[in-house]
Amino acid sequence: LNAKLQMILDFIESEPEITVTHFVADKKKSGGAYVKHTGVIKKIDEYERVVVFTDKTSIPIDNIYEINSALFSSLE
């Protein structure tokens, strides 16, 4: 994940579309679900440890399970 986040930072100006699978805790009981969010990343806030999308969605880096994008085809 760190290599992918770094690659996103390197190419953030080209606004690549990214799909992030992340864990969302259930607010009423223990547990939760894995949810996918697709969009363009606006910034990666390393101090707050969140990924912020252009649609204002904010995902904690610690909750990210997987990141997919055509950008990573060279890594696979």
Image (spheres, grey):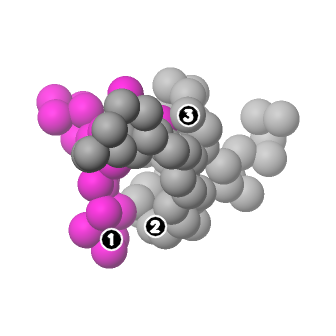
Q: Residue at x 79, y 47 (%)?
A: 73
Residue 61 visible in image: no
Tell me the tag on residue 65.
3
**Where, quadrant-wise, is the C terminus in this rendering?**
top right
Label located before the other in sequence (3 or 2)? 2
Give yes or no for contact between labels 3 and 1 (Cβ–Cβ under 8 Å). Answer: no
- The quarter of the picture where residue 19 lies is bottom right
Q: Residue at x 71, y 45 (%)?
A: 72
Q: Amino acid at mark 1?
A: Thr
Q: Position of residue 62 (x, y in %)?
A: 37, 28
User: In the structure shown, which secondary structural element does the residue marked by tag 3 occupy?
Assistant: strand
Label 2 sits on residue: 40
Q: CA distance from mark 1 to mark 2?
A: 6 Å
Label located before the other in sequence (1 or 2)? 2
**Magenta highlight range:** 42-64
In this rendering, position of residue 12 left or right of residue 36: left
Q: Residue at x 49, y 68 (%)?
A: 39
Q: Residue at x 28, y 54 (%)?
A: 58
Q: Amino acid at mark 3?
A: Tyr
Q: Nearer the viewer, residue 66 or 75?
A: 66
User: In the structure shown, which secondary structural element does the residue marked by tag 2 occupy?
Assistant: strand
Q: Amino acid at mark 2?
A: Val
Tell me the tag on residue 54.
1
Q: Position of residue 31 (x, y in %)?
A: 43, 33
Residue 33 visible in image: yes
